[in-house]
Amino acid sequence: MTHGRPIIQRAEERFRGGDLPAGIETWHAFSFAGFYDPDNVRFGPLSACNEEHLAPGAGFAEHPHRDTEIVTWVIEGELTHEDSAGHVSVVRPGDVQRLSAGAGVRHVERNAGAAPLRFLQMWLTPSEFGGDPSYEVVRGLADGTPYALTRADASLRVWRLDRGHGADLPAAPWLYAHVVRGAVRLGGEELRAGDAARVVDASRLRAEALDPAELLVWEMHAEPHFG
């Protein structure tokens, strides 16, 4: 991978998964479940960026996680979350949800509303394994404000940009930018909804909105240590 230069993954290049008869459609940016590409397993600590589409009433039954930082960004609709630590929340557009699985946790995710639900769920591998699970929801994350994942030495930012406006992206060993909606120009490339850019040793990058846009950006400083 070229250092400092964005490598683009177009929306249509993602792997399509999910369970359509159950009302679940998923688009995977990385190897996941039954799809494996040895050249696309992770980027820094980021190991999943799944765009989930859930019909009303659809959802994921209770299932376990461990040693994973799970961050969710709702695009439209409402996501209902329940976990084995007793947390029950409804997550809406503009909110950031974090579930740190630690040594082990179980959770349920579903669309309990009457409207379709669409959200991004991103998994990061922590720098150290184990520990107690933890959970939080930050309501209404402000533009450009970093949401830090201390266990993974990473931060998430969102920018909602009017046409012609831009944002200076943070310098980082690994930077991942995903266009939620609209269109931006980044490093000479035009990215539209569902497109993503991966940059190694990112510095002096600026995103310019070609249309009103929403952009999620991961700034990551450490790879996980296994074993």
Image (cartoon, rainbow, N blue to C red):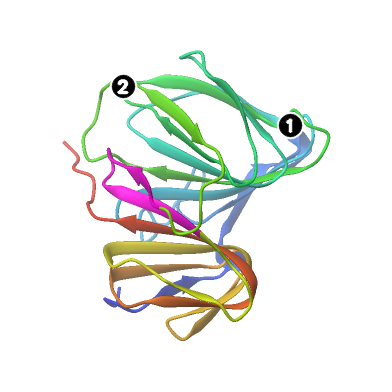
Counting every numbered tag in the picture gives 2
Looking at marks 2 and 1 on the same chain, the residue that comes earlier in the sequence is marked by 1
161 in magenta: no
Residue visible at 40% across and 62% down? 176
Residue identifier under label 1: 58
Residue bounds of the magenta highlight: 146-158
148 in magenta: yes
Task: Report x, y in % for residue 23.
Answer: 76, 38
Which numbered circle lies on residue 121? Answer: none
> Which residue is at the far left?
227
Residue visible at 31% across and 49% down? 154
| Distance in Å between CA atoms under marks 2 and 1 | 28 Å
> SS of the residue at dot 1?
loop
Left or right of residue 99, residue 213 in this image: right
Task: Report x, y in % for residue 202.
Answer: 30, 71
Q: Quadrant of residue 24?
A: top right
Residue identifier under label 2: 103
